[in-house]
Image (cartoon, rainbow, N blue to C red):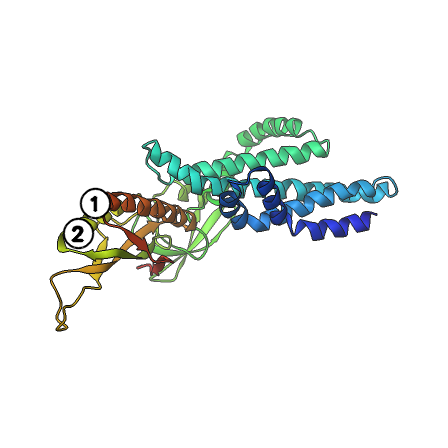
Amino acid sequence: MFLVALLLSILVGRYTPSIVRIFLNRFSPGQSSPIANNFIKPVQGPFRMAGTFLLISLSMVWLQPEYPGLYNFFRPFVDFATIFSVAWLVSRLFRQGVRIYGIDLLRRLGREVDELLLVFETLVNVVIGFIAMLAFAQSQNFNIVGLIASLGIGGVALGLAAQTILEQLLSTIVIYLDRPFIPGEYIRLNNGQLCRVESVGLRSTKIRTAAKSTLIIVPNSKLIKEEIENVSRAKKVMVLLYLDFVRLLSEEDAALVKQVVTKCTNSLFGIDPGSTSIHFSGGAVDDNGRSQRFSANRARVTFFILGSNDNSIQLRKRLLELANDSVAEQLQAYGIEFTVQDPTIYVESPVTL
């Protein structure tokens, strides 16, 4: 029975996203499609993993009566996989909620959307991981509170005995958590020297100079106090938007479109100011084949998105979607309607060292 339940758990777990969609259609028919597109479809992998391990955990009840030894051996591994797969699913769902609803909510409240939103997302993920760790310890009857208290007392004694070593180790932990740079990236130090990060160790970081190719070993406790310019993370993505207008635009209409689009894009956080460029095309011709007075039915909008990592770029892409809605609302008020050609083109710009 256990082997049959285990096989069914693996098979049924693969269809967890579909099962969730069925329940949504049953209990909330009107909201099932947006929820499925925004929350279920982008995180199908975590849904499958969490559903599979939950079913495997339930199938363990068939193993306990006849084979208690095997049950006690496999139970901690199953509990660990189940708890942390569910925690991963919750983390990904929260991320989708922030991307879809959190940004829009902050803009409606009149707040500026910036990198602080990503910091908040990271803190919530840390809390989710901590709760998962407590849940796993509780499932194994492990007194984690007592362990933390004993480590706290031991940590005071250790800090007094080895303050310098402890400072270096804590600095290493800060570098690994904050990740201001990773091996392979180029950084510029306070003295203006361009270096490539070779490795991050427990006590120090090894960096190689770009000019002499010599190796510099810098203590982590000193490195976190310096102002470092990360050249490799100077991400710059060019965005190409094509706007197809329902009717031909006059010169006055084109000027209005340019004003609205420039205002909406330049006000976005993370957009390179002054980089917005608009080119109109598709003018009409008369019966003799000559171009008429200025007219256009298509506009190509180009500008640059600035960011430090993939998460910040994704955040700015979401802001761009909201800016498109704002442009459409303002132009519709003047009787100018358009459609955005899909998909939006993103071109990564190379980093200049």
Q: CA distance from mark 2 to mark 1?
A: 9 Å
Q: Secondary structure at mark 2?
A: helix
At horizontal 18% and vertical 65% (from top left) the residue drawn is: 284
The answer to whether one can see residue 228 in this image is: no
Callout 1 amino acid: Tyr
Q: Which residue is mark 2?
A: 253
Q: Earlier in the sequence, mark 2 or mark 1?
A: 2
* Horizontal side, residue 101 vs residue 247: left or right: right
Q: Nearer the viewer, residue 61 or 187?
A: 61
Task: Tell me the crowding category of disc 2: few under 14, some 14 to 19, or many 20 or more residues within 10 angstroms, Cα based.
Answer: some
Q: Nearer the viewer, residue 319 or 145?
A: 319
Task: Tell me the crowding category of disc 1: few under 14, some 14 to 19, or many 20 or more residues within 10 angstroms, Cα based.
Answer: few
The answer to whether one can see residue 45 in this image is: yes
Farthest bottom residue?
288
Q: Secondary structure at mark 1?
A: loop
The quadrant in which the C terminus is found is bottom left
Callout 2 amino acid: Asp
Q: Nearer the viewer, residue 324 or 240?
A: 324
Q: Are marks 2 and 1 in contact (CB under 8 Å)?
A: yes
